[in-house]
């Protein structure tokens, strides 16, 4: 699975207003995404600091399908719908940042195996004690 995360800051700083505006365009966004080969899911996140930050997480079956979505206009179309409803913050705070990541081979991060004292399935190192002098 491929995870693509887009973060940006909007002009909308009120969570309720942000959610209402997003809900008004979500059907159009979902239509575009559902038409993309390899699309699995989409999730939106609100920045907890109340500064208008938001995130969009999309999941894809393969890197090629995700890159096709980005390069062939699907991402631009979704971005236009989002920006119309949730205007991007003014310069210098309005940059859009995309990161594309691969889920570990043992599955999605949410189903990661954990061990006591672990961190969501990611191995933790135990500190070696230095010998006392």
Image (spheres, grey):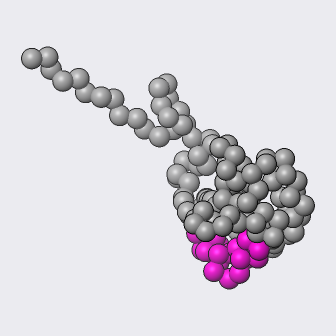
Q: Nearer the viewer, residue 71 or 112?
A: 71
Q: Residue at x 15, y 20 (%)?
A: 131
Q: Is residue 66 magenta?
A: yes
Q: Residue at x 65, y 43 (%)?
A: 49
Where residue 110 appears, as percent x and y from the top left, is: 63, 43
With 18 as the anchor, is 119 left or right in this view?
A: left
Where residue 69 appears, as percent x and y from the top left, is: 68, 75
Q: Nearer the viewer, residue 72 or 44?
A: 44
Where residue 7 appears, as percent x and y from the top left, is: 63, 59
Q: Quadrant of residue 100?
A: bottom right
Q: Residue at x 65, y 75 (%)?
A: 70
Q: Residue at x 18, y 24 (%)?
A: 130
* Residue furthest out toward the top: 132
What is the quadrant of the N terminus in the image? Answer: bottom right
With 28 as the anchor, is 3 left or right in this view?
A: left
With 11 as the anchor, is 99 left or right in this view?
A: left
Q: Is residue 49 above or below residue 34?
A: above
Asked whether residue 107 is in view, the answer is yes
Q: Quadrant of residue 31?
A: bottom right
Q: Is residue 75 magenta?
A: yes
Where residue 92 appears, as percent x and y from the top left, is: 57, 66
With 74 as the anchor, is 71 left or right in this view?
A: left
* Residue furthest out toward the bottom: 72
Q: Which residues are magenta?
A: 58-80
Q: Quadrant of residue 48?
A: top right
Most common secondary structure along the magenta stretch? helix
Asked whether residue 96 is in view, the answer is no
How many labels, in total? Answer: 0
């Amino acid at each position: 699975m491929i995870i693509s995360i887009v973060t940006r800051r909007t002009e909308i700083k009120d969570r309720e207003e942000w959610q209402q505006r997003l809900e008004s365009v979500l059907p159009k966004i979902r239509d575009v995404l559902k038409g993309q080969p390899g699309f699995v899911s989409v999730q939106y996140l609100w920045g907890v600091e109340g500064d208008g930050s938001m995130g969009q997480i999309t999941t894809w079956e393969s890197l090629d399908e995700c890159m096709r979505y980005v390069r062939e206009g699907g991402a631009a179309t979704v971005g236009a719908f989002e920006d119309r409803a949730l205007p991007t913050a003014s310069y210098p705070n309005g940059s859009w940042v995309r990161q594309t990541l691969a889920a570990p081979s043992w599955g999605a991060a949410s189903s990661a195996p954990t061990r006591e004292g672990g961190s969501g399935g990611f191995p933790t190192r135990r500190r070696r004690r230095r010998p006392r002098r």
